[in-house]
Image: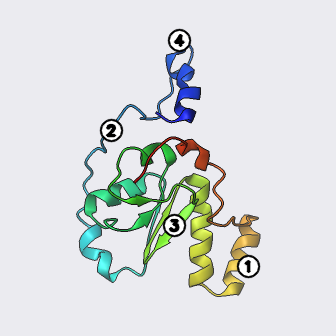
Amino acid sequence: MSKHDERHNHLRESPQTRLFDNSERRRIPQVSSPGIQPRFPELKALLTVRVGSLHLVQTGLLDGKRAATNKYALKLTLNVSWVKDARFVVDGKIWTAAGVTAGLDLAAEFARVTFDPEVNKLASELFEYQAKPARPDPFKYLLDGVKLD
């Protein structure tokens, strides 16, 4: 259990509060993803946000890859080279984001390297959003005490 988990254990035990963070689960539920693996070679890129990367684990597409996912979900499987100090990770044509807002930054970075600068400027202005870089990840402390090797 990480220091962060220990600090927030009282939330799980409080009669007024129930924290559903899946920290007690140690396996990922099986999902049906028959369409992803056969189509992967023809894709230009595959982007996932938060626990979407855990579904890719089941396909084998993340084998030997560096990836990011939700910090709590990351503790469920160690078969991937999880990067704990990045908001998002790009490994070849697989793009993974650690959390929901990191997914916005991942999408912005994907757009930056994929589309014309004018399109990106317009999108940034329309959404009134300025993307953050992959590093540093201000939430890396959530994995304090978690060994990923």
User: How far is mark 2 from mark 3, CA to CA?
Assistant: 23 Å
Indicate the secondary structure of the residue bearing disc 1: helix
Lower sequence index among marks 4 and 1: 4
Residue 1 placed where, x, y %?
A: 46, 33
Indicate the secondary structure of the residue bearing disc 4: loop
Is the C terminus in the top left, top right, bottom left or bottom right quadrant?
A: bottom left
User: How far is mark 4 from mark 2, CA to CA?
Assistant: 24 Å
Q: Could you tell me the amino acid type at mark 3?
A: Val
Quick one: 31 or 123, which is closer to the camera?
31
Quarter occupied by residue 127:
bottom right
Lower sequence index among marks 4 and 2: 4
User: How far is mark 1 from mark 2, CA to CA?
Assistant: 42 Å
Indicate the secondary structure of the residue bearing disc 2: loop
Quarter occupied by residue 16:
top right
Q: Could you tell me the amino acid type at mark 2?
A: Arg
User: How far is mark 3 from mark 4, CA to CA?
Assistant: 39 Å
Q: Could you tell me the amino acid type at mark 4?
A: Pro
Which residue is the site of mark 4? 15
Residue 124 shown left or right of residue 145 in the figure: right
Q: Are marks 3 and 4 in contact (CB under 8 Å)?
A: no
Which residue is the site of mark 1? 121
Quick one: 114 or 78, which is closer to the camera?
78
Q: Are marks 4 and 1 in contact (CB under 8 Å)?
A: no
Residue 98 shown left or right of residue 108 in the figure: left
Task: Please tell me whether mark 4 or mark 1 is closer to you in this view.
Answer: 4
Which residue is the site of mark 2? 26
Q: Could you tell me the amino acid type at mark 1?
A: Lys
Which residue is the site of mark 3? 89
Question: In the image, is residue 10 above or below residue 131?
Answer: above
Question: In the image, is residue 16 above or below residue 118?
Answer: above
Lower sequence index among marks 1 and 2: 2
| Residue beneath the point at 56% across and 83% down | 114
